[in-house]
Amino acid sequence: MACDVSLSMTDHLGALNAGLREFRGGIHADPAVAERVLCCVVGFAETAYEVQPLYPLDDLARLPERGESAGTGFGPAFVFLRKAIAGDVRALEAHRLRVHRPLMFFLSDGCATDPTTWPAAFAALTDPAWASRPRVVAFGVGDADEDTLGRIGTFRTFLARDGVRLGPALIASVMRALPRADRARSVHDLSTSRPRGARTMTRNEKGAGS
């Protein structure tokens, strides 16, 4: 989970925290899903940092209530995320755990301050030659730049201004990303219908396996 905590996000961080709580509650409503989901939270502004390491969804760290800096560096976030994912995958595999392709949530108003440099970092993060490349769900808040977020959301793109709530969008995306066998074991189907406002669905990764 990559969360924009720059100054431009100050008015939206409370809603993001509420959405993350709803996401946690929805996942825990289905034990078959909860036992298969681990979550890491990364905050980013001018730089990126780990808010919470990869843990089960027993709890989610709160984002700061106020934006931290004027810069919004997408590039540093994508570089940080590639390193974090690679390290987490190695750690899980060292414990002989089965690891599926990660699902990354990118939450932002879409106003990057490094528009010419972030695409290269994003290309490295989503490189088709990298087995651990994440499927990316972009969620835009406020006056989100739809074109920018559409380039980032390789799996799905949602915009809050379309009336989409963060929690249900995240839950539905997790359910869609789960392997079919895991979805079949789920007690509650949390995503049989496409949430209103989903702009982008499995574009270049349509049909990709987990």
Image (tube, rainbow, N blue to C red):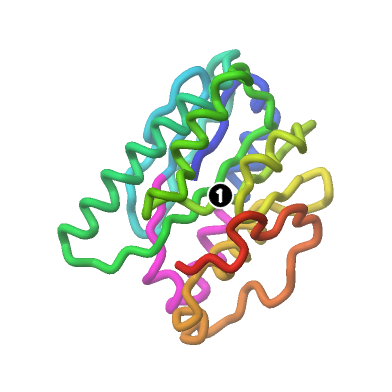
- In the rendered view of the protein, which quadrant contains the C terminus? bottom left
Answer with the quarter of the image where residue 94 lies.
bottom left
Left of 78 or right of it: where is 14?
right
Q: Position of residue 57 (x, y in %)?
A: 41, 59
Q: Is residue 150 magenta?
A: no
Which element is circle 1 on? strand
The residue sitting at the front extreme is: 129
Residue drawn at x 74%, y 68% is 194
- The amino acid type, in three-letter code, at marker 1 is Val
In this rendering, is residue 105 above or below 8?
below
Is 108 in front, or is 94? 94
Q: Position of residue 136 (x, y in %)?
A: 56, 49
What segment carries the magenta color? 21-40
Residue drawn at x 46%, y 24% is 76
Residue indicated by mark 1: 136
Residue drawn at x 37%, y 42% is 52
Q: Position of residue 21 (x, y in %)?
A: 55, 53
